[in-house]
Image: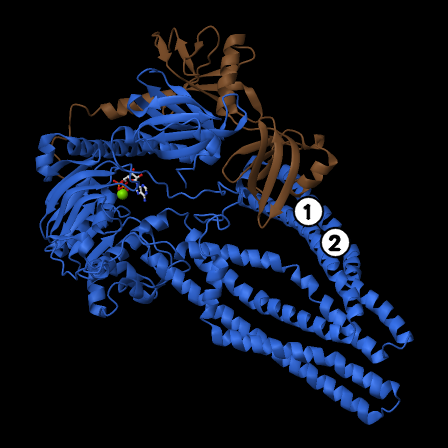
Amino acid sequence: MGFKNFEGADEEFDLAQMEAETEEMLRLRYLNKDNAVFARTAGGFVSLDIAEGEKGEPEHYDRVRVVRSFPFTAPTTYISIRTTEEKSKEIGIIKDITKDVSKDTRKMLEEQMSLRYFTPVITKIHDIREEYGHAYWDVETTEGPCKFVIYMNSSSVVSLSDVRLLITDLDGNRFEIPDFTQLSAGELKKLDLFL
Amino acid sequence: MNLKFDLPAAQQQAFTPADGEEIRYCSPYDIGADGKMKHDGYIVVTNQRLLIISGQEAETELALADITYLKCDPLVNNGILIARTVQEPEEHILARFTMKHVSRVAFIAKGALLLRDGVPKQVISREYDKTCPVCGRALRGTKECPKCSHKPSVLWKFFKLCGAYKGRLAIIAFLMLCVAVVQLMVPKIQQVFIDDYLKAGKGGMQEITLYAAILISVTGVTIMLHVLRYWMCISMGTKMSMDLRQMLYKKVQILSLSFIQDRRPGELMNRIVNDTRQVRRFMEEAFAGMFSCIISMISVVVVMLTMDWKLTLMSVVFVPIALGLSISFRKNIHRRFHMQWHRFDKTNSGLQDILAGMRVVKSFGTEEQEAEHFRKLTDDFAKIQEKNEVFWASLFPIISFVMGMGVYVVTYFGGLGVLEDRFTVGQLQQFINYTWMLYGPLGWMTFLPRMITQLMTSLERIYDVMDEEPLIKDHAEAVELDVKGAVEFKDVTFGYRSYEPVLEKINLSVKPGEMIGLVGASGTGKSTLINLIMRLYEVDDGQLLIDGVDINDLRIEKYHSQIGVVLQENFLFAGTIYNNLRFAKPDATEEEIIMAAKMANAHDFIVKTPDGYNTYVGEHGYSLSGGERQRLAIARAILNKPKLLILDEATSALDTESEYLIQKALERLTAGCTTFAIAHRLSTLKDADRLVVIDGHHIAEVGTHNELMEQKGIYYGLVTAQLQMQALKGEDAAEATEALA
Ligand SMILES: Nc1ncnc2c1ncn2[C@@H]1O[C@H](COP(=O)(O)OP(=O)(O)O)[C@@H](O)[C@H]1O
Ligand SMILES: [Mg+2]
């Protein structure tokens, strides 16, 4: 096939970039109070400064995402700090925010996480009414009273452990019952359809 | 999805519109700054400002002109609206909301930016809300809440639909009346027999025989009437669901692709198949039963009243009680069996999981562990099942007892009446029989609300499609055009969503018989351009001319019959290859078909199959490879001798050799036929008369292969990148062979 000009000047370009991407994919950098400085921004987020980056140069991020690696089982360890664009990249991981960063930073990061994750905990069940394939819940949560609707199928109420339930409503909101054995007998009876 | 909620009176106090200012978008936000649920927060976008209203105050007020950045950021199970403004150049949070509003706010943010830029387009969302924003009821795939919208009710439409079957309905009603009358007669005959013959001691063998004969013939008549009625209902239900299905199918065909693509695949199929079946089932199982119950209950009560009104009242009093009790039993039982079903489901999927993953289980040697896991699941299921069976076995007699309460009362007081000589024994027997007739259908009637709701849900979904207006339809003066093949784009702008153009101001003039190769990275809008030529969508702005006539002025069917389309994914209908090939030209001769197949390099593999052109393909038929499907699709497209040929990655699943062969054949065919071709392998397109490179919503480059290679622009980059990838693969292959050697 007669493509001329095949040997262009930038022919190595693609290769180099792919190498770099692979490198980046495999990188695992731990952040702690010695190498990373987090600060609140005026807009209610946090910024990150790394004095000495991988190649020795300083890195600055106006706003970072604070993401749990194991949101259900380990909410305070392996916190991934990421860039904000759509194809978010990992800047680094904090192994344990109860140990590896200062109290102030920890508070800051926890604020960001409570912004990111919104899973009200159900403290009281007023009513669960079942109607033609849907269940209408009327509950009290840590974030205030709430009414929501779920599908009557097995994926709407998932057990995370023997006693812990995660409930997903039609819109995709989530609610948690950390220990259903703590509920009153009347509440349990309303719930037993889902256990 | 509603993007403009009505602002409640309380929140309106926070908002004083300036001159000429009006609300364009409005959505609640339901998480406060403290992370608590909130019920009085609103995001309001006017043609001048963006306001975040909390309670009766405007927390934030931004002039649209000051906004430099506005975005809805979806987080985990909630979302935030982020802005940057001239005054506050840092990203900051304006509002936070649950998943109910995330998509809504995303649309509104786009709308606000359009308003800021002075673009007069109103953003609309074709997504459906999951729950009714007004009453909170779950919406089952309909645009509006059937309870809150004030459209003519579905039930009314259903009655109108039934109107089309008046004759049958009249016959059914007549049969039901007959059944009721016959049923009422039986106890009366018994009474006469008991009082006038048995008790009076007048009866002999003859009377008993006569009585038996009468009873047998009455029973026979009842059975016949029932069968007849049931048969009528089934035929009506079947007819009705068939009519509905056809109406739906037609409607779906008329509705534009955008309607279909906005829905989950399978959802429309569900409506056509399941919802119409639901209607049929209702007509068969519930409809006639419902009316015959009502008719016979009313007539029974009337007859009983004429006999003894006091006793009648006593027995009727228990009807609501028995009904209430059996409904609550039903609920409880439903609950229990739902649980059992749920466990069963879990056990099943557990088993399926293990079986499907058997190779993994074996390779990791975790058989014991999995067996234990499965044993637990079955144990659970067995326990629940046992419990339910016991419950059912002990409850059933109780239910029967409760359902018979009225009868006991009648027996007691009626018996007293007989002793006091107010009744004869025959009359008592008659009365007791009527009471049974009154209570008998109650159990069945408790199913009714559920069945009616199911019917309503299905009807709502059916009418949701029926009431949709097609976006693309022939207008009155549409012309039948014999296409010659000139295609002209004049300032064409189009986007699947009005606020997000995929193609902008496209200008291109194609002469009849020209072959155009469309090139560009994936997602740049090549297929979109072709969709416009196929008139699957209408252009938003500008004009698309076919032989100088606006495409919107063409009669769609005639136009479509003159274009041939081969796509990457080609659908074959269940049927023979022969039937699939002549899909667009049912009167094609065998010779024409073989010629077309040869041209598509398909003849050889077709003849190789045992059944040749009569090979059955489709879902359960002979399985063809992707390449074979594509070749069939090409044959199908060229059989019709189209004036416009569209090839969208039509040869992507072929190996280079077959591609080359088809290419050569197509070249001969496409002489005199305007062709638009998209190919992933750019070498396929190098013989095109012109290549059109699409990039960044626009036409970036136009020219022949050689011209574009000389320009060293985008096309040049794409070609070199592809050659390099080939070279890389080649190297790998070389290395691999080396390593093997
Ligand atoms: N049915 C659709 N609804 C909404 N967006 C679509 C639809 N089809 C394609 N798009 C979007 O339009 C853009 C162009 O797509 P397409 O024309 O298929 O690209 P190409 O064929 O060049 O790869 C893409 O961003 C794609 O996500
Ligand atoms: Mg495409």
The three-letter amino acid code for the residue at tag 1 is: Phe
Q: Nearer the viewer, residue B161 or B350?
A: B161
Within 10 Å of disc 1 (Cα), the crowding (few <14, some 14-19, many 20+) is many
Pick the quarter of the image with the N terminus of chain B.
Answer: top left
Q: Nearer the viewer, residue B640 or B399?
A: B399
Q: Is mark 2 within 8 Å of ligand 1?
A: no
Q: Residue at x 44, y 67 (%)?
A: B242
In the rendering, at what x and y percent does residue B198 appear?
86, 86
The kind of secondary structure element at disc 1 is helix
> Which dot marks residue B389?
2
Q: CA separation, marks 2 and 1?
A: 12 Å
Residue B58 shown left or right of residue B551 in the figure: right
Note whether residue A130 is visible. yes
In the rendering, at what x and y percent does residue A94 appear?
49, 15
> Which dot marks residue A121?
none
Q: Nearer the viewer, residue B397 or A31?
A: B397
Of pointers 2 and 1, the one earlier in the residue sequence: 1
The three-letter amino acid code for the residue at tag 2 is: Glu
Pick the quarter of the image with the C terminus of chain B.
Answer: top left
Note whether residue A89 is visible. no
Q: In this rendering, is residue A16 above or below B515?
A: above
- Asked which quadrant contains residue B479, the reply is bottom left
Residues at marks 2 and 1 on the same chain: yes
Task: Residue at the far right: name it.
Answer: B419
User: Which tint is chain B?
Assistant: blue
Within 10 Å of disc 2 (Cα), the crowding (few <14, some 14-19, many 20+) is few
Q: In this rendering, is residue A11 above or below B486?
A: above
Q: Which residue is mark 1?
A: B381
